[in-house]
Image: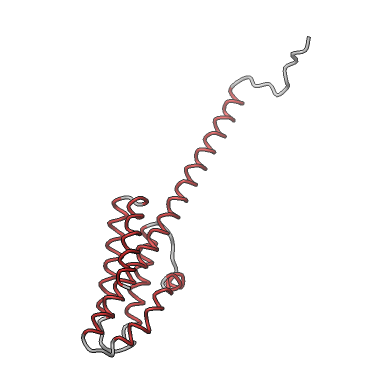
Amino acid sequence: MAKKYEKAIKDKRLEAGKLMTEKQIGRCNEAIHTATVAAGASGAIPISFADAIPISVAQVTMVIALGKIFDQEITSAAAKGAIAAAASTFVGRNLIKLIPIAGWIVSAVVAAGVTEAIGWTIAVDMAKNYRKEYERRINAADAAEAWAEAEAYKRDSDFDDEADDFSY
């Protein structure tokens, strides 16, 4: 399972490199890695189910921070929905905690891996939306400029609305 998360993270980071500026990548790294460390530390808590709230808080905070990077307002309800996929590891991580030390380590690694995979997946999706919105604004600005130029041309040149008669 760890290989699956590693591949997903690697693929999303490569995609992020194509979509984001260096500054955005840096800010994403900061938000995602902070949440990953917090989730990993929380996942290591040896008491079953005691990590649910701290991991959720770290992930929701991460999603909200990513939203700020890409100028997208994210409510905590939307952030919770975005990390619902992480819930699938919840029961397994807590059952493995019944094995002292090794189980706690596995739980921490899975919590961290899932958090990072979720973070990069959401960051890439937000970067795509950010880019689409940017392109939409540029196209709208270009269209408005073209319209203004056409209107100015009509106004400034003795433009006659009547068609010229070319018949002989």
Q: Quadrant of the C terminus?
A: top right
> Is residue 114 left or right of 82 when viewed as pictured?
left
Residue 13 on image: x %, y %: 32, 58
The residue at the far left in this view is: 101
Residue 45 on image: x %, y %: 26, 84
Q: Quadrant of residue 53?
A: bottom left
Residue 121 on image: x %, y %: 38, 63
Residue at the image point whose x is 28% and y is 87% from the top: 97
> Is residue 148 left or right of 52 when viewed as pictured?
right
From what the image shows, is residue 111 above or below residue 28? below
The residue at the far right in this view is: 168
> Is residue 126 left or right of 55 when viewed as pictured?
right
Q: Nearer the viewer, residue 42 or 16?
A: 16
Residue at the image point whose x is 29% and y is 73% from the top: 112
Q: Nearer the viewer, residue 111 or 132?
A: 111
Q: Quadrant of the N terminus?
A: bottom left
From what the image shows, is residue 128 above or below residue 98? above
Q: How many marks?
A: 0
Q: Nearer the viewer, residue 95 or 35?
A: 95
From what the image shows, is residue 96 above or below residue 112? below
Residue at the image point whose x is 47% and y is 43% from the top: 138
Residue at the image point whose x is 77% and y is 12% from the top: 167
Q: Please, which colouring scheme is shown?
A: secondary structure
The residue at the far top in this view is: 168
